[in-house]
Structure formats: C-alpha cells, structure tokens
Image (spheres, rainbow, N blue to C red):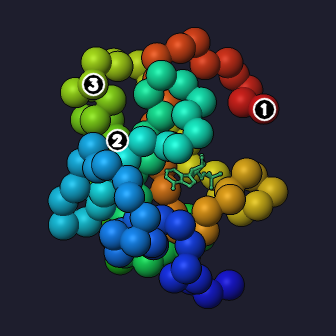
Amino acid sequence: MSYDPSNVFARILRGEIPAPLLHEDDRCVAFRDVNPQAPLHALVIPKQALRGLVDAGPEDEATLGHLLLVGRNLAAKLGYPDARYVINHGAGAGQTVFHLHVHVLAGRPLAWPPG
Ligand code: AMP
C-alpha cells in the first residue's frame, strides 16, 4: 500500500499539528505520545515518508538504526536506563498511524509478553 501523506505524523512533520519535539535532527524527530502508556512514552519517527517497517529497504538501514539510537539516547537523557522499544507493523499488530515509528516506553514495570 502506498504512503498516505495525510497521516497524523506527516502532519506533525509539516508543522500542521503541534507536537513539542524532544529531539530533531536531519533524519528524524521525537515527541511524546498523546496517549502515554508509561511515564515516558515517546515516538521516534523518520522524516522520510515510510509507511511501515516493510517499506524500508537496504538503503534505509542507517535510518532504521538511527531511530533506535535516538530513542535509546533520549531515554537515557531523560533518566530511564531501562526502556522498551516497540514497532507495531500492520493493523493486526496494533499499528494505527501509517508512518513508521518507534515507541519508547519506560518508567514503570513492563510485562512480557505484551498484550
Ligand atoms: P501505533 O498504534 O503503533 O501506530 O502508534 C501510534 C501512536 O500515535 C499511538 O500510541 C497514539 O497515541 C499516538 N498518537 C496519535 N496521534 C498523536 C499525536 N497527535 N501526537 C502524539 N502522538 C499521537
């Protein structure tokens, strides 16, 4: 399926919806989830228009790694050495916003397996 530029994260990237940024660089931004599931619940998203993980190719390897490192650094900077990094891919796995994103969750005990 093709990328829909009207998704909420694309709108945040275009500045059409406010989202105070926790981080920005040339490849990604991070901001707090509007419906936090933990004391820290941030989303790290690429600036690139990628619908989900399956749309990333070998040329996106560095970007994918970058998202994880930015998420890890953010959690550490905010005082959370332990954190969970989650990518939901596809509606059946819980994806609701179809712009690739990494959830960073921390600050409470996190059960496994996730629901
Ligand atoms: P997922 O279900 O993995 O696609 O995650 C999408 C996440 O985006 C959910 O946790 C939502 O709470 C979050 N979300 C939706 N709209 C916004 C918004 N305007 N600002 C921040 N987070 C949002």
Residue with the mark numbered 1: 115
Q: Is residue 12 above or below residue 110?
A: below
Is label 1 in a helix, a strand or a loop?
loop
Image point 81% across, 57% down: which residue? Answer: 92
**Quadrant of residue 27 in the image?**
bottom left
Residue with the mark numbered 3: 78
In terms of sequence position, does the residue under pointer 3 or pointer 1 come before the other? Answer: 3
In terms of sequence position, does the residue under pointer 2 or pointer 3 come before the other? Answer: 2
Query: What amino acid is at disc 3?
Result: Leu
**Quadrant of residue 1 in the image?**
bottom right
Query: What amino acid is at disc 1?
Result: Gly
Residue 71: mark: 2
Image point 51% across, 82% down: which residue? Answer: 5
Q: Is residue 46 above or below residue 113?
A: below
**Quadrant of residue 17 in the image?**
bottom left
Q: Is mark 3 within 8 Å of ligand 1?
A: no
Image point 38% across, 58% down: which residue? Answer: 18
Q: Is residue 67 visible?
A: no
Mark-to-mark CA distance, 3 and 1: 26 Å
Q: Nearer the viewer, residue 114 or 11?
A: 11
Mark-to-mark CA distance, 2 and 3: 11 Å
